[in-house]
Image (cartoon, grey):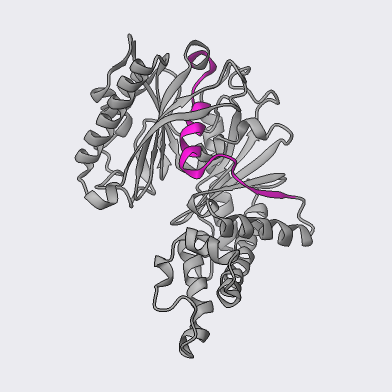
């Protein structure tokens, strides 16, 4: 589908916009490097498992590893959390050692972000991703804040408020212009990951709080696509089926569903809805010039209720961060780091201090804004290499 046709069909804004109803995006998906490679690899969930394994090695050699033969990447977060409060002091000490090492790495990576031009004067950072959904993750985040403050960085570092599985869907509300939210009480949201695809019916809570702080996922469906290894076309077909099911559920349950679908997707999202890079873990080639997810979904779901379907897609780290918009109104500049397979990142500047979604009517991306964000990213990456 041609770009001009897609924009006309969507009819509200560009995909991957740097100017959103409540925030400007100063930087996103930056891939900083050092002599060892990408910085994000030093603070990923895989990195934590490697640290845990290293701390187990001395005891494993003497046959006293409290975890036995269980591979470090197979031990669940729930098990590790239980060990932190359990009676096995040796096992607890191993986990605490890994947490401390991880916090030091996360502090190092955060420090490097804060020294870039785009992240200058950041006042608060929220940390999301699956790693945050655990006691060990919360401890690592708290320890990171302490390390940075001990070095005189005036920065708050805290876990994202919404459950990581829901933050990427709640954040989709902040992609939509206010007129959509004023006339309806719910939207459809999609959170696409390298392992799972989640679809949700998100209740705005607009009548309780116009800043969307009362928003919640009323209903959701999860598909672990990594187990099925579908083709790209098969994945889109399954996704459309999940969304159609939620549309039916919304009608049955009496929701006034907006004709809007917000999508969180890995990678750099082009204005026409194609994916420039970063989607290598998704089923099939999602970076092909011949593939456009929003266009495919509009073809499958041309209308919701009596209105044409509108779709906006953005980077998954950005959308997860947007779930925090109502709670970031006491600062001007803030960022999000999402700890998963890699380290997602975005830096925001609030556009107004009401926390709501739409007092500023100029919501579409401007070319100047787009160029500024891209230039910030390029400058930061260039400076990091020098």
Q: Which residue corresponds to the image point at 61% horizontal and 54% vertical from the top-left?
A: 138
Asked if residue 179 is among those painted magenta in the image, a careful observer would answer yes
Q: Quadrant of residue 384?
A: bottom right
Percent position of residue 149, x then y: 76, 57
- Image: magenta residue range: 155-180
**Which of the pair 104/20 is nearer the observer?**
104
User: Please, which residue is most extreme toward the bottom here?
Assistant: 62
Asked if residue 55 is among those painted magenta in the image, a careful observer would answer no
**Which of the pair 41/202 is nearer the observer?**
202
Q: Which residue corresponds to the image point at 33% horizontal and 12% vertical from the top-left?
A: 305
286 is higher (above) or lower (below) than 102: above
Percent position of residue 304, x then y: 33, 16
Residue 323 in sight: yes
In the displayed structure, does residue 298 sit left or right of residue 354? Answer: left
In the displayed structure, does residue 191 sit left or right of residue 371? Answer: left
State the quadrant of the N terminus: top left
């Amino acid at each position: 589908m041609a770009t001009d046709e897609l924009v006309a069909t969507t009819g509200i804004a560009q995909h991957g916009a740097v100017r959103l109803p409540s925030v400007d995006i100063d930087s996103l998906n930056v891939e900083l490097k050092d002599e060892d490679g990408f910085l994000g690899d030093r603070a990923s969930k895989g990195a934590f498992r490697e640290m845990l394994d290293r701390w187990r090695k001395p005891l494993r050699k003497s046959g006293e590893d409290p975890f036995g033969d269980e591979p470090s990447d197979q031990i669940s977060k729930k098990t590790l959390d239980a060990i932190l409060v359990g009676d096995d002091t040796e096992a607890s000490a191993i986990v605490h050692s890994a947490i401390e090492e991880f916090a030091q790495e996360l502090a190092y990576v955060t420090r490097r972000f804060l020294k870039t031009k785009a992240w200058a004067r950041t006042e608060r950072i929220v940390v999301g991703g699956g790693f945050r959904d655990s006691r060990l993750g919360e401890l690592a985040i708290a320890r990171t804040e302490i390390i940075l403050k001990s070095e005189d960085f005036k920065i708050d570092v805290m876990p994202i408020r919404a459950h990581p599985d829901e933050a990427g869907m709640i954040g989709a509300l902040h992609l939509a212009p206010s007129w959509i939210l004023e006339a309806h009480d719910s939207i459809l949201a999609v959170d696409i990951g390298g392992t799972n695809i989640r679809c949700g019916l998100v209740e705005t809570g607009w009548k309780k709080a116009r800043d969307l702080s009362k928003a919640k996922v009323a209903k959701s469906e999860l598909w672990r696509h990594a187990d099925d290894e579908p083709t790209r076309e098969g994945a889109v077909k399954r996704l459309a089926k999940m969304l159609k099911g939620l549309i039916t559920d919304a009608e049955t349950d009496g929701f006034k569903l907006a004709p809007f679908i917000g999508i969180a997707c890995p990678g750099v999202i082009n204005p026409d809805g194609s994916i420039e890079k970063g989607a290598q873990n998704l089923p099939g080639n999602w970076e092909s010039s011949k593939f456009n997810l929003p266009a495919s979904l509009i073809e499958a779901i041309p209308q919701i209720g009596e209105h044409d379907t509108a779709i906006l897609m953005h980077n998954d780290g950005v959308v997860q961060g947007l779930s925090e918009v109502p709670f970031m109104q006491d600062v001007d500049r803030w960022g999000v780091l999402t700890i998963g397979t890699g380290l997602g990142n975005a830096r925001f500047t609030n556009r107004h201090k009401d926390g709501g979604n739409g007092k500023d009517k100029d919501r579409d991306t401007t070319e100047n804004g787009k160029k500024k964000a891209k230039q910030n990213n390029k400058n930061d990456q260039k400076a990091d290499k020098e």
